[in-house]
Amino acid sequence: MTSIGQAHVVALSGGVGGAKLAYGLLQALPADSLSICLNTGDDFEHLGLHISPDIDTALYTLADLANPQTGWGRRDETWTFMQALDRLGGETWFQLGDGDLATHVERTCRLARGELLSGIVSDFARRLGIRARLVPMSDSQVRTRAITDEGEFDFQDYFVRLQCRPRIQAIRYMHADAARPAPAIESVLRDPGLEAIVICPSNPYLSIDPILAVPGMRSAIRAAGVPVVAVSPIIAGEAVKGPTAKIMRELGRPASANEIAHHYAGLIDGFVLDSRDRGLADTIGCSVHIADTLMRTTDDRIRLAGETLRFARTLAATPGGRRQ
């Protein structure tokens, strides 16, 4: 394990790609030095249960319980429930493993009792032995909707049931205007011990933009006065996982790392660019660190996390390296 020193860092994250870097940050930082703000725009209700895909991917990844083949769901999962549901003619397009089902049932029961999502997530993380603060972006409901050439869909309908086949025309974040950041995120962004904010290599449109759409989130990040560094989710014009490149092209934007950096313009101070895209360095528009951003192994996650944190610290120490 590489120690980066006593630091307090906030990460913004979506699902699998973001959770991988978050895992690396957790290993690279001292205990209790990492807070992760998680996307809840793709939360939805299914079979009477409140499902939080990005939150659960982070929980399972950081607790070392995630399925290594898929990056989501639990390792060594069983599927008795889904098999029984299928025999009864129930909806099976969204797969819920037996162990995973317990997470959804307990969360739903506690929400029905009036508990806040942020408190439930914090308790789950504690019970799973995670040495980081996991916080949903908001305790209010925000729902990502895909507007496509085949109609408008809830995100999970588009992503899972329809396998991202419809052509994206626009994306909107329902109820975002009425939401507010979870109090724990507001607190850590105001913490004088905060050293950096990392935007993980998650889909900017589906995972990070819902977070930033919550009123007050952007201004709180800007007001933190620390370097904000984004890690590219695009390598050589393609996403490592997920529909990022497809969505960018359908929205009329080039599927390139510099387009991601421009998307975050005005918010970020630094950008971690994959070494295969080093030719784009002069077009990024802010300070650049070039690294191998492909996280195939645990060591890759820790290495990239360490490089990202050191880059942020370099920006903090460089006159003009961060916004004032």
Image: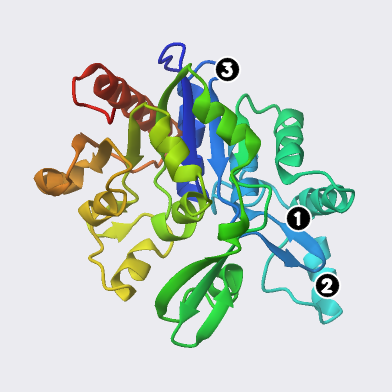
Calculate the distance from the C-alpha at mark 3 to the C-alpha at mark 1: 32 Å
Question: In the rendered image, which residue does mark 3 sit on?
Answer: 31
Q: Secondary structure at mark 3?
A: loop
Question: In the rendered image, which residue does mark 2 sit on?
Answer: 85
239, above or below 193, in the image: below
Answer whether residue 79 is visible to the viewer in this image. no
Residue located at (58% from left, 35% from top): 185
The location of residue 47, given as percent across then percent down, is 80, 69
Answer whether residue 92 is visible to the viewer in this image. yes
Q: Residues within 10 Å of mark 3 (few under 14, many from 20)?
A: some
Res 78 label: 1
Amino acid, disc 3 = Ala
Lateral position of residue 111 relative to residue 315, left or right: right
Q: Secondary structure at mark 2?
A: helix
Amino acid, disc 1 = Thr
Q: Quadrant of residue 219?
A: top left
